[in-house]
Image (cartoon, helix red, strand yellow):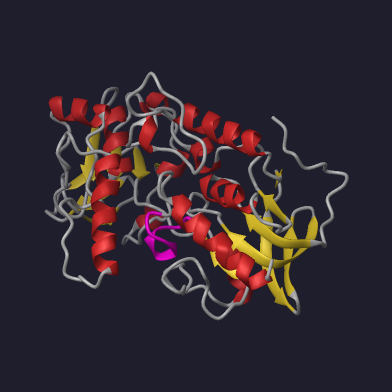
Amino acid sequence: MRSFVNDNKVDQNDYDLIIIGGGQSALACGFYLRRTQIKYLILDQQSQPGGAWIHGWDSLSLFSPAEFSSLPGFMFPKSENYYPVRDEVISYMEDYQSKYELPVKRSVQVTAVLKQEGGFTLKTSIGDFKAKAVISATGTWASPFVPVFKGLDQFKNEQLHSAYYKNASDFIEKKVLVIGGGNSGAQILAEVSKYTAVTWSTIGAPAFLPDDVDGRVLFDVATQKYNEQKAGNDQVQAKYNVRSIVMVPPVVDARGRGVLNSKGEIERFTETGVVWKSGEEENFDVVIWCTGFKPALKHLEPLGILQPDGRVNTNGNSKVEGINGLWLVGYGDWTGFASATLIGVGRSARSTVEEVGDFLKL
C-alpha cells in the first residue's frame, strides 16, 4: 500500500492545512481538497487505511447495502453480503486513498495541538508540524466510554469494552454479562450467546427497528427531519428512532433463539458480579461494556476548549467556536448532519473544505 508521502522528504513546517486522523472523514476531506490549491497533509495514527474499522470485531458489518455506503466520488463495490463486512470496508478505504493519491503519513500520533501566531503547532510522535489550519477527524474509537457504577472498582473478574472485542472464542464456557442497549450490545450478545451463557443489561427495554428498516432507511428519515428543521419546523418527529437497534441477520437469529431479553438495570458491582435493581445477586466471569464512546479529542486539551462531556462548542457544523482555523469533522451530528456515517460525511467534508479555503483565501 503506497502512502504517497516520502518519509524522508516531508516538510513539517510548510502546510496550509493538516488533517488529524485517517479514517472516512479524513478521506472525504481529502477528496474535496484535491480540487483546491491548499497544501495539506493527513496524519494518521494507524499503520494502514481503515480508520476505526481496523479495530472492529471480526463479524462487524455495515447497516446499509453497498450502494448506500459510499464516500464522495467513488462507489462502494458490489458485495456478496447484503451488508458489507469489516474487511470489505477496510479494503474500500484503502482503494479510495490509492485512487485519489491522498497524502497520508501513517503511524504518527498527534499528542497536542497548540495555537500560535500564524497558525498551529502539532506535537507528534515524530516531531513538530506546523500548519495555518487544522481539521480534527479522529473519530471516537480511541475514547471508549464506561459509565460509573458503585462497586465497579471492586470487580475482580475480566472486563473489556466493545472497542476491544474480536469474537466469542475467548468466552466459551464463561458466564458473560453484556451491558448496553445499542447496536453493539445486541450484536455482541447475539454472537456470544451462540457459544455460552449471556445475560443482557440495559436501561429500559431495548428498542428494535422493524426488520425491513436498515441504515439506508434511517439516513433517508434523518435527512427528511434535518431538512424540515432547516426550514423552521422544529416540531417534526422522525418516523424511526435512529438510536434503535437495527435488525441485522445475527440479531434476527438471536431473536429466533429467544436471547434478546434484557434483565434490566444494575444496582452495583461486587467482587465477582453484580447486584440487580431487583436485589438479586449474580456472578459473572466476564463483563463486556457496549456503552459507546466519547470524542477522541485529547490532542485538543492544550487549547482549553473541551467541555465536560468531551465535546467542543461548534457553530452547529464543523467550525470550532473561539479558535480561528480549527474544524472538527465526523464526530456526529454536532459537527455536521450524519457526519459520522460513510454516506453522510461527504456533506460535512465539502462544506468544511470550502470554509478552510475561505479562511486561507486560497
Classify residue 236 as left or right of residue 315. Answer: left
Which part of the image, by quadrant, shows the N terminus? Answer: top right
Magenta residues (range):
329-338
Q: Which residue is drawn at 15% across and 45% down?
A: 263
Which part of the image, by quadrant, shows the C terminus? Answer: bottom right
Q: Is residue 61 above or below residue 281?
A: above
As for residue 265 lying within the magenta part, the answer is no
List the single residue furthest toward the right. 8
Classify residue 312 as left or right of residue 191. Answer: right
| Res. 86 in view | yes
Classify residue 201 as left or right of residue 344. Answer: left
Classify residue 213 as left or right of residue 39. Answer: left
Q: Is residue 164 above or below residue 143?
A: above
Q: Is residue 287 above or below residue 60?
A: below
Which quadrant of the view contains residue 185?
Answer: top left
Q: In this view, does 109 lie above or below 351?
A: above
303 vs 241, nearest the viewer:
241
Residue 198 location (% of width, % of height): 25, 34
246 vs 97, nearest the viewer:
97
Q: Which residue is drawn at 15% across and 54% down?
A: 204
Q: How many labels does the image show?
A: 0
62 vs 350, nearest the viewer:
350
318 vs 110, nearest the viewer:
318
Which quadrant of the view contains residue 37?
Answer: bottom right
Residue 159 location (% of width, % of height): 41, 43
| Res. 61 in view | no
Please tell me whether the stretch drawn in magenta is mainly helix, strand or loop.
Answer: loop
